[in-house]
Amino acid sequence: MSVEQGSAPTPLTADFFPDCPVSAVPVLGSRKWSWKILRCLEGGPRRFSELRVPLVGITAKVLAESLRSMEQDGVVARTEYGGNPPRVEYALTPLGRTLLGPMDAVCAWSRENLGSLLAAREEYERES
Amino acid sequence: MSVEQGSAPTPLTADFFPDCPVSAVPVLGSRKWSWKILRCLEGGPRRFSELRVPLVGITAKVLAESLRSMEQDGVVARTEYGGNPPRVEYALTPLGRTLLGPMDAVCAWSRENLGSLLAAREEYERES
DNA sequence: GGTGCCGGTTACTTCAACGGTACCGGGACG
DNA sequence: CGTCCCGGTACCGTTGAAGTAACCGGCACC
């Protein structure tokens, strides 16, 4: 393994198996709307139709699916108050709240670097 | 922290349009392997076949696709050294390096809370 | 009796990512 | 000559998330 130019890079220390814990990240983040939903719940419980307002463009079906999957993952809690018209509230669980910090870090990065990212894409287009 | 029924939670301050900057997060993170690839490049440039070793289970096709898309986003740089057999190296760009910090935060979260997450899913199964 | 509201559901279509297998160019090496 | 190596590409099928549109139960109000 003759790496002629430059010093040898630090060796890889770990393998990344398909079910390594890091895989949970895309599982949580892959849904298009889940991070936005989390943000909407940051300030307190919200009703279904209340969530639809800031989430411009989401459909009832996708919102319901996303909430269901976040409930399944234990980051969101669904509470049904009886009555009519029906009333349902969604809130962050304690586990969900612990996700806000890490999410903030990534969101801040994306705000700061979205420009570079789009520029890189444009340049890539031009080259090809 | 209890939220009395009737008292308004803190108001939502922002709308989340389909093309809001936060949308860049899933764009980057949704690829199953991209975060792992970033980790593999952390220690220095790697060759294509070198990357396949720690990324247990990835196929050449998917690795090539992922690297191409990360190159397009400007977080990875591809360098072709001539010769034969061919030699190609992938490395993080400065932009890619800035992503390591935020990524660490999310990875740490997933390491610490993967258990809770899986437990929540199991309980959800039992309830339904 | 008709309409509206809330919180969804169902059926159908579209699309991107993933996975698997096969194959390739071209020099090096025997 | 044949074979290996590296870094891929082509083709195909599957899956899962997203989008569209229509519909629903049940009470409340007019």
Image (spheres, coloured by chain):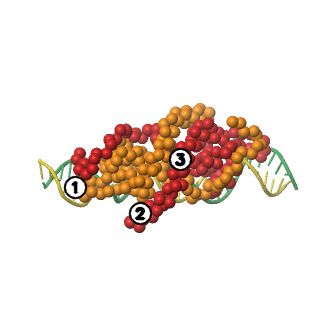
Chain colours: A red, B orange, C yellow, D green
- Chain of the residue under the numbered disc 3 shown in the image: A
Residue pointed to by mark 2 = A124
Q: Quick one: SS at disc 3?
A: helix
Which quadrant of the rendered structure holds the C terminus of chain B? top right
For badge 1, the amino acid type reads: Asn
For badge 2, the amino acid type reads: Tyr
- Chain of the residue under the numbered disc 1 shown in the image: B
For badge 3, the amino acid type reads: Ala
Front tag of 1 and 3: 3
Image coordinates of residue B3 in percent, x first then y, are: 72, 39
Verify CB contact (< 8 Å) between mark 1 and mark 2.
no
Residue drawn 61% across the image and 57% down it: B17
Verify CB contact (< 8 Å) between mark 2 and mark 3.
no
Q: Nearer the viewer, residue B122 or A11?
A: A11
**Quarter residue B15 falls in:** bottom right
Front tag of 2 and 3: 3
Residue drawn 45% across the image and 47% down it: B100
- Mark 3 is surrounded, within 10 Å at the Cα level, by few (under 14), some (14 to 19) or many (20 or more) other residues, namely some
Asked if one can make out residue B58 in the rendered structure from this viewpoint, the answer is no
Residue pointed to by mark 3 = A105
| Distance of label 2 from label 3 (alpha carbons) | 27 Å
Q: Nearer the viewer, residue A40 or A85?
A: A40
Residue pointed to by mark 1 = B84
Left or right, residue A60 beside residue A117:
right
| Distance of label 1 from label 2 (alpha carbons) | 27 Å
Asked if one can make out residue B50 in the rendered structure from this viewpoint, the answer is yes
Q: Quick one: SS at disc 2?
A: helix
Residue drawn 64% across the image and 45% down it: A42
- Chain of the residue under the numbered disc 2 shown in the image: A
Q: Examine the rendered structure and indicate whether residue A53 appears above or below residue B104.
A: below
The answer to which of marks 2 and 3 sits earlier in the sequence is 3
